[in-house]
Amino acid sequence: MPTDYPLVKFHFQVDWGGTKIGFTEVSGLDVETEVVEYRAGANPEYSKLKMPGMQKFSNITLKRGTFAGDNEYFTWWNTVKLNTIERRNITISLLNEEHEPVVTWKVKNAWPSKIQSTDLKADGNEVAIESMEIVHEGLTIQNE
């Protein structure tokens, strides 16, 4: 039975290659259909036709706290060898109160394109956060 309230966004999990990793933030779950414009010279209309073109996917950014001895990011990053890299399918799930997926984003053939270590601040009072930007070849969304 559906409720009258929208879903909250703070309870989620990320699964890559069977490993579930805790993240503090996931962004870039965007998909866009590019527009193809066309007009024949003999067309009586003085405007272009607009047709759906190729799909375009944003890079996904994953942020998490930095933990001593946890090299999961860097292990994947170090699989880069010239024009090859270990590609992974990633599942990102928004969870309900029973920890069951209610919305799932499935990411195809992802690989890390950028890793950013935490910034350092002598008078700061925050957790050290590292981030990884991944590129991919497809995103599907399932609303359970």
Image (tube, helix red, strand yellow):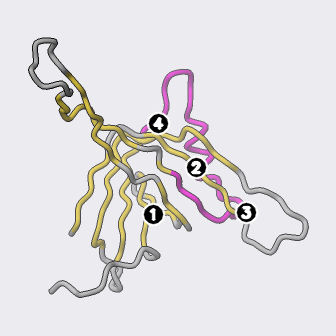
* Spatial separation of the CA atoms under disc 1 and disc 4: 17 Å
Name the residue: 20% across, 22% down: 38
Number of numbered discs present?
4
* Spatial separation of the CA atoms under disc 4 and disc 3: 24 Å
Of labels 3 and 2, the one closer to you: 2
Do tag 1 and tag 4 residues touch (Cβ < 8 Å)?
A: no
Nearer the observer, 28 or 65: 28
Please state the horizontal and vertical placement of residue 120, each as a whole percent of the image: 82, 59
Residue at which label 3 appears: 68
Q: Secondary structure at mark 4?
A: loop
Do tag 3 and tag 2 residues touch (Cβ < 8 Å)?
A: no
Instruction: Give the amino acid at mark 4.
Output: Glu
* Spatial separation of the CA atoms under disc 3 and disc 2: 17 Å
**Highlighted magenta segment, given as a residue range:** 61-87
Please state the horizontal and vertical placement of residue 89, each as a whole percent of the image: 36, 47
Nearer the observer, 21 or 47: 47
Which mark is on residue 86? 4
Instruction: Give the amino acid at mark 1.
Output: Lys
Name the residue: 27% across, 34% down: 35
Name the residue: 16% across, 12% down: 41
Q: Secondary structure at mark 2?
A: strand
Tell which circle, 3 or 2, labels the residue nearer the N-terminal end.
3
Q: Is residue 125 above or below residue 56?
A: below
The quadrant of the picture occupied by the C terminus is: bottom left
Tell which circle, 4 or 2, labels the residue nearer the N-terminal end.
4
Residue at which label 2 appears: 132
Q: Locate residue 127 relative to residue 103 in the image: left or right.
A: right
Residue at which label 1 appears: 20
Q: Residues within 10 Å of mark 3 (few under 14, many from 20)?
A: few
